[in-house]
Image (spheres, rainbow, N blue to C red):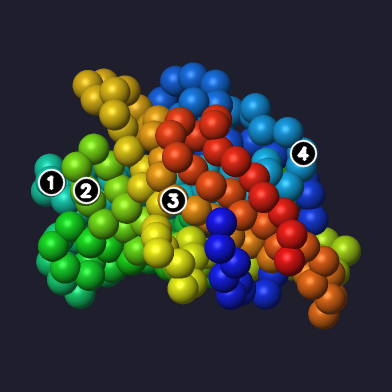
Amino acid sequence: MKKISLFSIAIIVLFASACTKGDWLGDNYVGGRSAFYNSDGKSYMMNIADNIVTDALDELELALLVDNIGSQSGGHFITSGSIRTEGSKWTVKADDSMLNGMTITCNGENSWKMQFDGKYAFTSDTNYPTVFDINAVQIEEGWRITLGGSRTERGGYSCEFNTGSGTDVDYIDYLNIYGGDFKGWNFMKGELYMIVRKGDAVVDACCLVFSGNPGSSTYHRGL
């Protein structure tokens, strides 16, 4: 894996759980809030790849469903025209959403940007300031996403994360290769990068590589 420039980040290892979308199928899919990740660096990165990204994708897919059935007056979003119209922006306003306040803006055909700046919880006791931009492009069998963001933790730790800067592949594909009624994404391809900082000092840098089912991802550390 070639070395790249990363965002400055900081992180503290937390007890984690993954987001829920559909039935729990162990670590071979993402999407859902099932607690199977261990409390280590890899699990923290999986909380970013799963909890943050899949919560955002769930909101995007809900927005597309709402738009398709023509019920833009529903209570979950503040809407402005069809979510499929370039420049149209919807805002999540549901109090029970993990991403209340997130905006979804249509970039053009089959492409959307999701932006969030607020408190976000991996688990009930890990509700910390989190900022991210996600670009999602609808592709066959799923989504191609690019991600950049940051999170402030306790004890002087903070983190920033991204899907690559100056790499050959700067995205992660979230695919459902089972098809049918399967909910979630069971095949991922791409890389997630992170550096860790305590105060002003960089204390670690990490990379999580996806090349199949999420459970087979490989975790690398080192500056």
Judge by depth and name the residue closer to the eye, 163 or 128. Answer: 163
* Amino acid at the residue labelled 4: Ser
Residue at 32%, 53% in the rendered image:
144
Label ID, residue 190: 3
Residue at the far right: name it: 155
* Amino acid at the residue labelled 2: Ile
Kindly indicate the quadrant of the structure image that contains residue 117.
bottom right
The x and y percentages for residue 19 are 53, 37
Kindly indicate the quadrant of the structure image that contains residue 78.
bottom left
Find the distance from the CA under tag 1 to the CA under tag 2: 18 Å
Residue at 37%, 43% in the rendered image:
174
Query: What residue is pinned by disc 1?
Result: 68
Mark 3 or mark 2: which is in front? Answer: 3
Q: Is residue 152 above or below residue 87?
A: above
Q: Is residue 130 in view from this perspective? A: no
Disc 2 and disc 4 in contact, CB within 8 angstroms:
no
The x and y percentages for residue 93 are 41, 58
Query: What residue is pinned by disc 4?
Result: 39
